[in-house]
Image: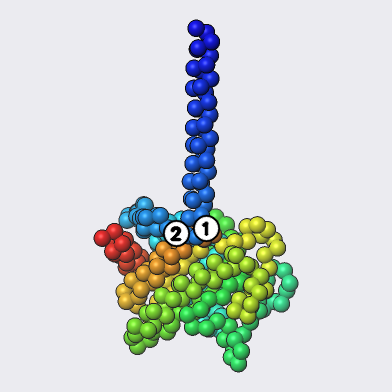
Amino acid sequence: MLIYLVLICSAFFCVVAENSQELSMLASSLTFLAGKQTATKVPISGITQLKLMRENNEGTHLFTKYQLGNYQISLIVQDILREPADAIVNAANSGCLGGGGIDGVISNAGGEKETQLSEHTTLYDLRVALPEISGTRNRCPLGGARITRGGWLQYDYTDSKIGIHKERLNFNYVIHAVGPSCSGGITEEQKKTLANTYVHVLERVHVFNKNPKGGSAQYSEFEKIIISDLGDDYRIKSLSFPTISTGIFGCSTNETADFVVDAVCALLEKNPESDIKQIKFVFWDPTNQNKAKADYALYKKAFNEHLKSKSA
């Protein structure tokens, strides 16, 4: 009787062992297939759908947060110099040497004078070092973007107890983006150019994250970006956009927000994997907070409409 029992148990454990091997092989196959799918960037149904995550519609600093695949997208009513990010996008002109609006604010914070020092370089020094486009004094084409380090980005604010205080800002990079000038009305072509400006920022950041030394004339400014002090943290994982071309350049947010949102979402949906994790659209006008909130509402409407169009 004992012999029969031993034989039955042995047979049972042999079957279990065989099934375990099959289960292990099946698990390995599924892991391989999953890895293959990731490598070829075949999106799983619904994984790149825009999703509304959180929102705050009260107080001064309104915000709405979305998720699009691995990307966190935020709309924020806030001083852009106060919003933490690896990089801040500057609404620049083609010369990239400073101007009015948000460009003036960032220029002032980063240092507007040329020092030609090798260390602690001002933002002006860094922009002067950008390669000029052949035959012109321009450093960035219309609709394009160029990356520099952040320079001496500092923020001046007044405290009732200590007076004027300069606070160091932790932006490793400034991305100079040149949108169209729409004074006198905006055309369909200018709307597309503005939308592509946002897209080109994200594309250039993606290339920089993969190869910060460039290696081609197309990314010649990469050679001048010193990243040795950042180590493995050189990548741009978060960036903040202002509303490009909507100030003195005259491009109405009411007419351009949907173009920008659709173009950015289309790019992210096609590229679900990236080192970029956080993309912020920051709205601020210290002299007119109603305008900042109005622009925020227009972008929120555009994102919500994009969300509805994809879920329909």
Please tell me how crowded label 2 is: few (under 14), some (14-19), or many (20+) other residues with Cα within 10 Å.
few
Q: Find the residue positioned furthest to the right.
A: 118
State the image quarter where residue 128 is shown: bottom right
Q: Find the residue positioned furthest to the left.
A: 312
Indicate the position of residue 21 as horizontal and vertical percent values: 53, 35
Q: Which residue is mark 1?
A: 39
Disc number placed over residue 251 in the picture, else none:
none
Under circle 2, the secondary element is loop
Q: Which residue is mark 2?
A: 42
Nearest the camera: 86 or 275? Answer: 275
Nearest the camera: 18 or 132? Answer: 18
Indicate the position of residue 61 as horizontal and vertical percent values: 39, 58
Residue 153 appears in the figure: no
Nearest the camera: 198 or 90? Answer: 198
Residue at 32 percent of width and 56 percent of height: 57
Q: For the residue marked with disc 1, what is the amino acid? A: Ala
Residue at 49 percent of width and 22 percent of height: 12
> Label 2 to label 1, Cα distance in Å?
8 Å
Residue at 63 percent of width and 68 percent of height: 212
Q: For the residue marked with disc 2, what is the amino acid? A: Val
